Amino acid sequence: MGKIIVIGSASIDLVVQTEILPEAGETVMGSSFFTNPGGKGANQAVAAARLSNEVYMIGAVGDDDNGKHILSNLEQNNVNTTYMDIIKNEKSGTAHITLFDDDNRIIVVPASNNYVTAESVLPKLKNFSAGDIIVMQHEIPESTIQAVVDYAIDHGMKVILNPAPYRKLDKAIIDKVTWLTPNETESELLFDYQVDDALKAYPHKLIVTKGASGAMYYSDSQQLVEGYKKQVIDTTGAGDTFNGALAVALIENKPLEQAVAFANLAGSYSVTGLGAQGAMPYRKDLE
Ligand code: RIB
């Protein structure tokens, strides 16, 4: 079977839970604080590795305690970290998360994640081959994504691009990736037209996630693969779990409908516990 290679961010999440959201200039009391490993790339790698073997992460941490924590967490979760760089005199990425009213607000400070450059990533890709699936997101430089997509096309590798958080995306990249997985908001920002028209323009490629309602793509007609409703504790990382699980199902050659259903199921589990990776499921949970 092919390998899954996640190229992306690895960070530490600093999470505050609060009953009141402060206005500008206001101070409020929060109800709890915790830290845990996060970063969309690392979350996707962990989600995939809990569901399959042979998951690699290409990324970068700083030479600080957070970096050590990020690497040991990836290893504990069966993610191969051979191709993770440690950047001297740099901090590891952090994400500053406020949990309020069943949703999250996130500010990311990329730090070491800015070093996930084309120059550092492309030589590592020589260790992988046609049929392998690369998963990327938008917390690393856009130039890296462009270069990796071109490399993947030249070498018969497939690419899932999760365009989160939103930033402008070249149409050429959209054309070249194998699958693009925005949520509804990101899809509306990416395309000048309605989600329905975007789906039709990119059949079997554009997969738009709708949280607990499921995910949509276009085959001969518009398809909605229903989601699963679970009691929400924390939605952080649900999209990442969807993408990691989707990569697993696609590397196993599941047809798209089954792959999306599998990813929906995994994503629904992830909201049932605190933290981005706290409730990501293992294979036995989904069976
Ligand atoms: O998608 C959730 C992730 O986004 C968090 O873990 C945080 O690190 C941010 O990057």
Image: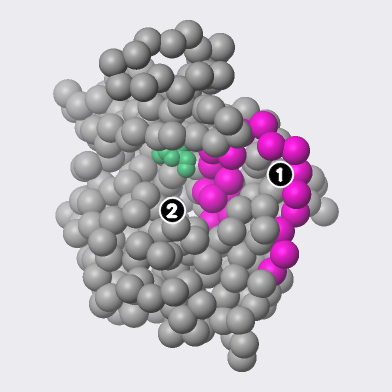
Q: Residue at x 65, y 39 (%)?
A: 271
Disc 1: which residue: 269
Q: Please determine whether, in this image, residue 189 is positioned above or below residue 231.
A: below
Kind of element beneath mark 2: strand
Q: Is residue 184 above or below residue 72?
A: below
Instruction: Give the amino acid at mark 1.
Output: Tyr
Q: Is residue 91 visible?
A: yes
Quadrant of the drawing holding the N terminus: bottom right
**Which contiguous range is marked in magenta?**
225-245
**Label 1 residue near ligand 1, CB within 8 Å:** no
Is residue 107 magenta-colored?
no
Residue that badge 2 annotates: 6
Label 1, secondary structure: give it: helix
Q: Quadrant of ligand 1?
A: top left
In the displayed structure, would residue 210 be above or below residue 84? below
| Disc 1 packing (10 Å; few <14; some 14–19; many ≥20) | many
Query: In the image, residue 183 lies at what x, y percent?
Result: 49, 58
Q: Is residue 131 above or below residue 135?
A: below
Based on the displayed image, in which of its 4 quarters is residue 231 positioned? top right
Nearest-to-viewer mark from 1 and 2: 1
Distance CA(mark 1)–CA(mark 2):
21 Å
Looking at the image, tell me whether mark 1 or mark 2 is earlier in sequence order: 2
Name the residue rendered at 55%, 36% in the picture.
103
View extreme (right): residue? 287
How is the structure coloured here?
A: one colour
